[in-house]
Image (cartoon, rainbow, N blue to C red):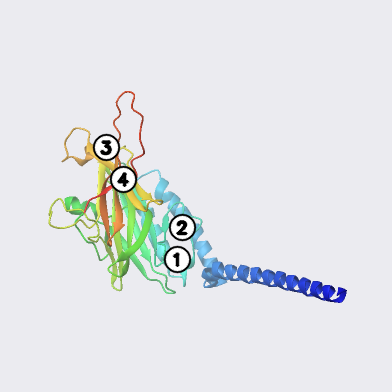
């Protein structure tokens, strides 16, 4: 009987030891795979090319500083053009898509969608004391450079800005701060959140739609369930909030509810035709994605008007009505 107990004890210890070793090897394998996944992108760049990237990046940093901070505003355009040439020359190095440009990504906007199907370079300069000009380029993840330069035509569009679909490098200029990926007719579409402050009397928050195709990039799509002001029978192709200069207006994604929220605006002088007089009302409207479109939601966060002695209720976030 004692021999049997000893036999069982030894086998149990062996089993425990074997399981522990398997766990250890599993952890090591997972760790190595994680390192491989994290380093795969950099593995596509040769050491010689990595040296080139770092030299060019340092050179571009100097140009970027002058592009933004040169004492004479008229020279900002000159340095911007120099930066564009440096950037294109650098991106022609093989596998440049995988170089992160960490040294200047806080000075020049570099954004990726969730599927990393492209990256967006985006910046603005102040060529005069009362204007801003926007620049951008879209790079595809290929060994040889595939780059789509973007040309700001926001001033040319005027009142038709919400109705237009832009291609051939034309683009409603903005500084982007968020990208959302979603399905549009079986293809990935990208909703871009942007800011445009080019007017001397008003600012704009913009929701634009980017679509990739074999022949280039398109901006704008009828995925907003909102009628056009100029042609009520058609939908808008981008959503623009215009408001008074110097006023803070919010437009962003509520990640918990997966809804876009933005300030509901009213004219300070009860003149809806003058968008540069618009200010936040204290209420919020928004968009909810379903049925492959952005559906307008009114009173996403309504204002509660209380009488003396009344206690406030909820936030109103759950009391939403979707406009169909």
In the image shown, does 76 or 248 lie closer to the viewer? Answer: 248
Q: Which residue corresponds to mark 1?
A: 90
Q: Earlier in the sequence, mark 1 or mark 4?
A: 1
| Residue 49, image x, y percentages | 52, 70
Query: Is 91 located above or below residue 253 in the figure?
Result: below
Q: Are marks 2 and 1 in contact (CB under 8 Å)?
A: yes
Residue at the right extreme? 2
Q: Are marks 1 and 4 in contact (CB under 8 Å)?
A: no
Q: Earlier in the sequence, mark 3 or mark 4?
A: 4
- Residue 216 visible to an observer of this rendering: yes
The image quarter in which residue 308 lies: top left
Q: Residues within 10 Å of mark 3 (few under 14, many from 20)?
A: many
| Residue 31, image x, y percentages | 62, 67
- Residue depicted at 80% across the width and 71% down the height: 9
In the image shown, does 4 or 168 lie closer to the viewer? Answer: 4
Q: Earlier in the sequence, mark 3 or mark 1?
A: 1
Instruction: Tell which tag, 3 or 4, sits nearer the viewer.
Output: 4
Q: Secondary structure at mark 1?
A: helix
Q: Which mark is residue 279?
A: 3
Q: Secondary structure at mark 3?
A: strand
Q: Secondary structure at mark 2?
A: helix
Label 1 to label 4: alpha-carbon separation:
38 Å
Q: Which mark is residue 262?
A: 4
Q: Are marks 3 and 4 in contact (CB under 8 Å)?
A: no
Q: Secondary structure at mark 4?
A: strand
Label 2 to label 4: alpha-carbon separation:
36 Å
- Residue depicted at 46% across the width and 68% down the height: 96
Instruction: Tell which tag, 1 or 4, sits nearer the viewer.
Output: 4
Q: Which residue corresponds to mark 2?
A: 60
Q: Earlier in the sequence, mark 2 or mark 4?
A: 2
Instruction: Tell which tag, 3 or 2, sits nearer the viewer.
Output: 3
Label 2 to label 1: alpha-carbon separation:
10 Å
């Amino acid at each position: 009987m004692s021999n049997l107990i000893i036999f069982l004890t030894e086998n149990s210890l062996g089993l425990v030891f074997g399981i522990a070793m398997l766990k250890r090897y599993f952890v090591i394998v997972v760790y190595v795979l994680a390192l491989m996944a994290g380093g795969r992108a950099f593995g596509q760049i040769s050491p010689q090319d990595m040296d080139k990237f770092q030299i060019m990046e340092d050179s571009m940093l100097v140009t970027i500083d002058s592009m933004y901070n040169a004492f004479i505003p008229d020279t900002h355009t000159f340095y911007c053009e120099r930066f564009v040439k440096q950037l294109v020359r650098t991106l022609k190095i093989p596998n440049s898509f995988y170089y992160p440009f960490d040294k200047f990504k806080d000075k020049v906007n570099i954004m990726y969608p969730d599927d990393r199907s492209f990256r967006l370079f985006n910046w603005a300069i102040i060529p005069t004391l009362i204007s801003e000009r926007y620049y951008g380029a879209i790079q595809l993840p290929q060994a040889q450079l595939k780059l789509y330069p973007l040309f700001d035509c926001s001033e040319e569009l005027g009142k038709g800005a919400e109705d237009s679909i832009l291609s051939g490098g034309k683009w409603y200029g903005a500084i982007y701060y968020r990208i959302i990926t979603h399905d549009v007719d079986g293809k990935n579409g990208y909703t871009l959140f942007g800011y445009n402050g080019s007017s001397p009397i008003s600012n704009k928050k913009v929701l634009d739609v980017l679509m990739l195709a074999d022949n280039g990039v398109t901006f704008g799509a009828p995925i907003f369930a909102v009628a056009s002001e100029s042609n009520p029978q058609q939908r808008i192709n981008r959503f623009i909030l215009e408001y008074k200069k110097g006023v803070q207006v919010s437009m962003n994604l509520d990640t918990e509810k997966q809804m876009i929220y933005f300030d509901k605006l009213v004219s300070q002088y009860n003149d809806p035709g003058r968008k540069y007089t618009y200010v936040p009302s204290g209420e919020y409207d928004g968009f909810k994605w379903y049925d492959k479109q952005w559906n307008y939601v009114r009173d996403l966060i309504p204002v509660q008007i209380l009488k003396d002695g009344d206690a406030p209720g909820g936030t109103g976030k759950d009391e939403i009505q979707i406009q169909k």
